[in-house]
Image (spheres, helix red, strand yellow):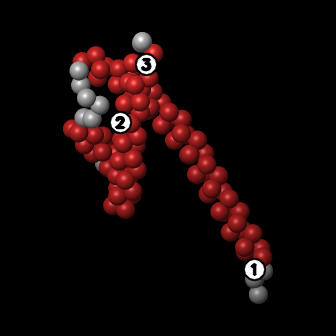
């Protein structure tokens, strides 16, 4: 009869390994999202100079299309679309907040 506690420990170890991999990816994602937000701030500055609004629906469609092309399965595509809708929304909010900070600092 197999030792259930050993089997459980093996599964626990495997779970910890997968979680460690996700933790590493989360650190990379956070760094990349910070970089993306810095770029969004730069884009906001350029948009202000040329009189464009923060919301650019055609560009957002392009971004979503690029991301969805990377999806390995329809289920991943659905998840990526939801994730990127959040990212795009936060990027717009960040650009508005960035503009507000810039106008305050230029006073």
The residue lying at 31 percent from left, 48 percent from top is 69
State whether residue 23 is above or below residue 3.
above
Residue 46 placement, left or right of 37: left
The residue lying at 61 percent from left, 49 percent from top is 23
Return the disc, 1 or 3, that comes first in the chain's sequence. 1
- Circle 1 SS class: helix
Identify the residue position indicated by label 3 in the image.
104
In the rendered structure, are the residues bearing label 3 and label 2 in contact, judged by CB atoms less than 8 Å apart? no
The residue lying at 36 percent from left, 42 percent from top is 89
Q: Is residue 72 visible?
A: no
Q: Residue furthest bottom?
A: 1
**Mark 1 → mark 2, Cα distance in angstroms:** 52 Å
Q: Residues within 10 Å of mark 1 (few under 14, many from 20)?
A: few
- Tell me the quarter of the picture where residue 8 sits: bottom right
- Circle 3 SS class: helix
Work out whether residue 9 or residue 98 is closer to the camera in this orientation and state it: 98
Identify the residue position indicated by label 2 in the image.
92
**Mark 1 → mark 3, Cα distance in angstroms:** 64 Å
Quarter in which the N terminus is drawn: bottom right
* Residue 83, image x, y percentages: 40, 50
Identify the residue position indicated by label 1 in the image.
4
């Amino acid at each position: 009869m197999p030792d259930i506690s050993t089997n459980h420990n093996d599964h626990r170890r495997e779970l910890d390994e997968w979680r460690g991999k996700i933790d590493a990816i989360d650190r990379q994602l956070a760094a990349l999202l910070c970089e993306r937000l810095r770029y969004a701030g730069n884009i906001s500055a350029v948009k202000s100079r040329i009189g464009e609004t923060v919301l650019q629906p055609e560009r957002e469609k392009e971004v979503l299309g690029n991301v969805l092309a990377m999806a390995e399965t329809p289920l991943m595509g659905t998840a990526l679309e939801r994730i990127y809708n959040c990212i795009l929304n936060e990027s717009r909010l960040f650009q508005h907040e960035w503009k507000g900070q810039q106008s305050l600092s230029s006073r």
